[in-house]
Image (spheres, grey):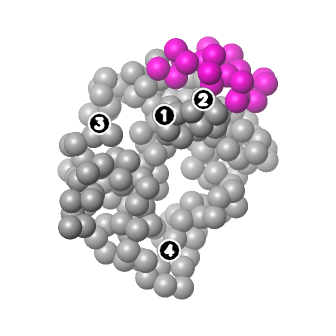
Amino acid sequence: MSDHYRLDPKLKGTARFKRCDWPNCGAACCIYGAWVDKIHAEDILKHHVEIGPYMEMERRHPASWFDGQEEPDDHALSGTVVHSTIIPNPEHYGGTSCIFLRKDQKWALQVAAEENGEHPWRWKPFYCILHPLDLDDDGRITLDDPELLLREPTSCLQASRNEIPLEETFQQELEYLLGKQLRQTKD
């Protein structure tokens, strides 16, 4: 995806946690919606015909997908991110969720991409792909507070009996974000 991301050295270590066994995670990450690069949001809206059928019926109108909030973001190609709409969702952890989260706990943008023969993350926003990883103050890919994530109900991380290399735990995300850079660090 990009050649400019670097890996925080602490991700070279191991930890006693593993990824959730989706769908048991419950999509906790979707509680507060997502910040989306403005260019990416425009692309999502441009493909509303492909995405809409995979949204819940009452959420298919593309004008409702983003709430109008914008913020500057140095990591966004456009320099600006927009926020997805947050909706009341009593069945979801915390009582709210991103408009793109479906009742089956699948993310409509990912389902739409797969059903249209695209990479599953074709329309998935950068910060959603990154989670539970994050960017540190130096712009390196790092890990959010794992202790906090392990205590969160329906978290994407679960405790593990064994130490697991972090690069293995987050291999899919890191290879997508770093591409050949990750493979070169393993050689």
* Front residue (pair 71, 15): 15
* Sequence-first tag of 2 and 3: 3
- Of the residues shown, which amino acid type is indicated by label 2? Asn
Residue with the mark numbered 2: 116
User: Would residue 23 be found to the left or right of residue 169 on screen?
Assistant: right
Q: Is residue 180 above or below residue 66?
A: below
At x 23%, y 53%, the residue is: 181
Q: Residue furthest front?
A: 117
Q: CA distance from mark 2 to mark 3?
A: 28 Å
Q: Residue 151's x, y, as percent?
A: 58, 69
Which image quarter is the N terminus in? top left
Tag 2 secondary structure:
loop
**Residue occupying the point 68% across, 16% down:** 61
The label shown at residue 122 is 1
**How crowded is the residue under tag 3: few (<14 C-alpha within 10 Å), some, or many (20+)?**
some
**The disc label shown at residue 17, or none:** 4
Give the residues drawn in magenta, as a range: 43-63
Which numbered mark, 2 or 3, is in the foreground of this view? Answer: 2
